[in-house]
Structures are given as structure tokens and as C-alpha cells.
Image (tube, helix red, strand yellow):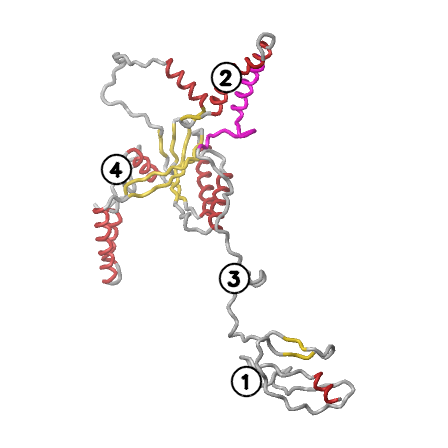
Amino acid sequence: MPRRDVSLRRRLPRRAGPHCPPGAEASSRPGRPPQHHHRGRAEAAPAQRRPARRSRHGPVLLCPRRSRAVRCPPRRCPADRKPQRDSERSPEVNRRDPEPESWDPLVKIPADVEQSDKLAWNLTARQLVQLGLAGIALWALWQASRPVLPPLVFAIGALPVAAVSIAVVLGRRDGIGMDRWLGHWLRHRRAPLHLLPAPLVHPADGLAELPLPVTGLDADGALTLSDGCAVLSRTETVNFALRTPGEQRALVAALGRWLNALTGPVQILVRTRRLDLAPMIAALRESAPTLPHPLLEDAAGEHADFLGHLSEGRDLLARDVLLVHREDSADPAARQRVLRRAADSGSLLVAAEVGTRVLDAHQAWSALSAACDGDAPMHPRPAVPSKPVTLEGER
């Protein structure tokens, strides 16, 4: 009987798995023989054990309290474990959260920047006033015709008037409201439409001077206008489509901070011009003999030949982005303010990875000349008006 009790309280051998050789017995501690402890009884000699048998559901244990068999799941070797996917891991393990594929824009800017604000029911203040006046007029007519006309007859007559009023107030054509479009049409119909030949009162001698908005140019690049001053800045471009959603959100936030920091009018000018590679080709051919190795000189010559072939076979275009800061007055204080605003815009746009450079007098005049004649070759440092032309070089 004591022998039987000992056999019930003893753990049966585990099955041989991939972590131990076949026929070996699992012990509670590796490297030590199994120990047998009995409460209040002398240590009995263990009976001869049978070799471990493989089981589909793992080893069988005898519970010492309830004396019934309990099956345990089989152990797996680390080599047998399957790699878990990122979606199957727990949040504590998967520390890296994936970025969202799409995100809602922070601010929606309409294409028509001069669009009026919507006050109520998606209507502007002008539309609300017009609809209110039309409603008051219909109500006054109803009060005046109430003793004479029945309600049904008044409703039949007022329905077309209300429909036309709503169509004129809410309708749009050619990008403007229907009420303004009708006003322009009436003004055009009332204006004279025939031109009569008549002699000039003061005939001009020769070619007349073309009036331009720019009347002066300072050495620091400030343009003197007829009604103020302006400063031109050349900016770089950023590839927005190849950025991740997080990077796009950061760029949009930086651009929004720049827009919120503006204290005066700013114009963003984007224009396309023909790209002239002749100065770059001339610079490569001039600097090729000064390179320290003949292979570098040959590579520079081949690159210059490639650029020449590229400029001859294709119509190359380049895109320029200019920022125009403007002030309404042309006094010295206004010039300093517009220059400081241009410098502040450059420091704020650095967060959006957009580099800016304020144009000096030569670069500003070159940009103005290219705007007047885009097909003409652009000189890197053209002569500035009202300045003497000097020749630099050996005599």
C-alpha cells in the first residue's frame, strides 16, 4: 500500500521532444537527478520506469490532490516556433505603429481665394440680405393684396417671382454671382458699342514711352512702384507626392504657420521658361583642364557633350517660383519693412524644406526682363538701369 501511494504522488516521465533526446527523462531542474520527497514517510526506492511514450496531446500528469490525470500541452523548441506577424503581436511587443495611409487635410483652401465667408445655411452675407429683401417684398405684396386676392391666386403669381429671385441670388456664371453678372451685362448694353474714327488731339513724336509699374530699382533689390515698393525672392520646390503621410502633414503645417505669420500682401508667382544650358556647358569645358586627373577631365568633357546634345535635340523647360512681398508706400521705412518680411518668410519656409533667396538688383532685373520677353536668353548679371556699364577683364 505505501508503494502504491508513492507511485500516485510521483510525476510520470515527460515525452521526448525536440529539446531533449529520445528516451531521456525530463526533470524539474536540468543537470540534476529527479528527487522524491514524501511527507512523513521514508524515501522509497523508485520503481523501474518505462521509456517515454509519445503522445499527441502532451505528457500526462497525476494530480496529487485529486488523483486524476491532467494533460499538458507539448513544449515547442524555439526553432519550431513560427514567426508572428506584426498584426498578431501584442501592443507591448509591436512598439512601431504603422502610419495611416490617408489623412484628412488640416485646412481646405478654395480655389477662389476672394470668395466671401459663409455666415448661415451655406450663404454669404450678400445672399442673406438679398433673400431677406425678396421675402420682405413678397410679404408686403401679400399684405397689400390680401383683401382683394385669394391666397391661391397670390401663391400662383408669387411662385415665379420667388423662383427667379432664388435663381439670381444663388446662381453663378463665369465664376461670379448671377446678380453681379446681370449688372455687368446691363452696364455693357448701355455703353456705346461703336468706335468712331477721330484725329488725335496731341499727336506723338516718334515712339511713345511704354508705362511700366516699376519706376526704380535699388541695389538691395527693392523695386520702386508707382504705388509702393516690392521685393522678389526665388524659392525652391519640394516633391510632395513622394513623402509619407506624416511628412506631408508636417510640410502642410509649416506652410500654414508661414501663412498665419504674414503681415502684408504676398504674391506666389509660378512661371515656365526655356532652359539654356550654354552657361553650364561653357563652365564645364573651362574647368575640365584644371581637374587633378585625366579621367576626371574626360568625364567632364563627355558630360558637356551630353548636355550639348540634350539641348539641341529637345526643348528644355525650367520652372521658377517667385515670392513677391509688397508694401503700399515707397518711403525708406516701407523698404526696410518689406526687406525684413522677405527675410522672415525665408526663415519660416525652412521648416517646410523650401529654400528662399532674396534677389539683388541684377537678379531682379533679369527676372523682370524674362517676364517681358521669355524667349530671350537670360544674362546672369545684366546691366541695371540708371547705372554705368563697366567692363571687367584684362586690358
Give the residue at x 26% y 59%.
291
For the residue labelled by badge 1, is the local secondary structure a helix, a strand or a loop? loop
| Label 1 – label 2 distance at C-alpha | 99 Å
The amino acid on which the numbered mark 4 sits, given as a three-letter code, is Asp
In front of the other: label 2 or label 4? 2
| Label 2 – label 4 distance at C-alpha | 56 Å
For the residue labelled by badge 2, is the local secondary structure a helix, a strand or a loop? helix
| Label 1 – label 3 distance at C-alpha | 35 Å
The amino acid on which the numbered mark 2 sits, given as a three-letter code, is Val
Q: Position of residue 127 (x, y in %)?
A: 52, 24
Magenta segment range?
112-140
Q: Is residue 100 magenta?
A: no
Frontmost residue, 61 versus 228: 61
In front of the other: label 1 or label 3? 1
Q: Is residue 123 magenta?
A: yes
For the residue labelled by badge 3, is the local secondary structure a helix, a strand or a loop? loop
In front of the other: label 1 or label 4? 1
Write down the residue under mark 4.
Answer: 375
Q: Is residue 212 depicted above or below 303 in this figure?
A: above
Quick check: 243 left or right of 5?
left
Write down the residue under mark 3.
Answer: 86
State the mark number for residue 22.
1
